[in-house]
Image (tube, rainbow, N blue to C red):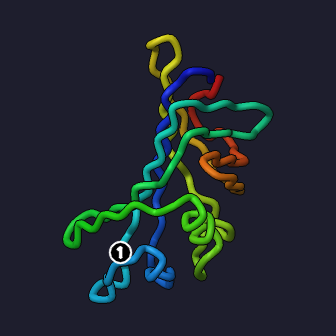
Amino acid sequence: MKETIVILLLGLMAAGLGLGILSMDVSRDAELEWLFLQTAPVGAYDAGMLRLEGIDYSVAFTDRPSRNVAHITNDHFMRLWKLGADSFADDPPNAALTYEIDKRPGRAVVQLTSIDVEGTQIRYAVDVLDGEIP
């Protein structure tokens, strides 16, 4: 995927999560379900590796009743990956991946099995569950 817009959405149950990393007090509801949104201007996929470039931060948000929202750095997101009893590292998340190539939209559902962050680049090892990634 060259010159594309890539949007990745994934969810995490925040129970047992180090919520101080998100810099907000959500102690009144320890069972919040956090969703994360990452948008990249450029992405590439090759042999099970998804590379997203140009990501400055992830948007973290919850639904009702709390409706929290936060921006978290890529380094913080990588720390969250391994945090807690139900971490993404122990229970890899599914994610919706949408993209656009030559003004044609595409989509896939993937399982993210590992993460690596370097500056504004995030690399995921993925298994495609539905759809396709060119």
Identified by mark 1, the residue type is Leu
Quarter of image, res 68: bottom left
Look at the picture and state if 34 lies above or below 100: below
Q: Is residue 100 left or right of residue 29?
A: right
> Which image quarter: residue 117?
bottom right
Q: How many marks?
A: 1
30 relative to 124 in the view: left or right: left
Residue that numbered label 1 is attached to: 32
Near mark 1 (Cα within 10 A), the count class, few <14, some 14-19 or many ≥20, is many
Q: Which element is circle 1 on?
A: loop
Residue placed most toward the observer, 120 or 25: 120
Q: Nearer the viewer, residue 130 or 58?
A: 58
The residue under the point 50% across, 85% down is 16
Residue farthest to the right, as pictured: 47
Q: Which corner quadrant holds the N terminus? A: top right
Position of the C terminus, as image quadrant, is top right
Is residue 46 depicted above or below 109 in this figure?
above
Residue pictured at 39% horizontal, 77% vertical: 23
Asked if 117 appears above or below 48 in the picture, the reply is below
Residue farthest along the top direction in this orientation = 102
Residue 110 coordinates in the image, percent (x, y): 60, 43
x, y percentage for residue 27?
33, 88
Furthest residue toward bottom: 27
Q: Residue at x 44, y 82 (%)?
A: 20
Q: Residue at x 50, y 11 (%)?
A: 102
**x, y percent for residue 108:** 54, 34
**Is residue 10 rendered to the left or right of residue 88?**
left
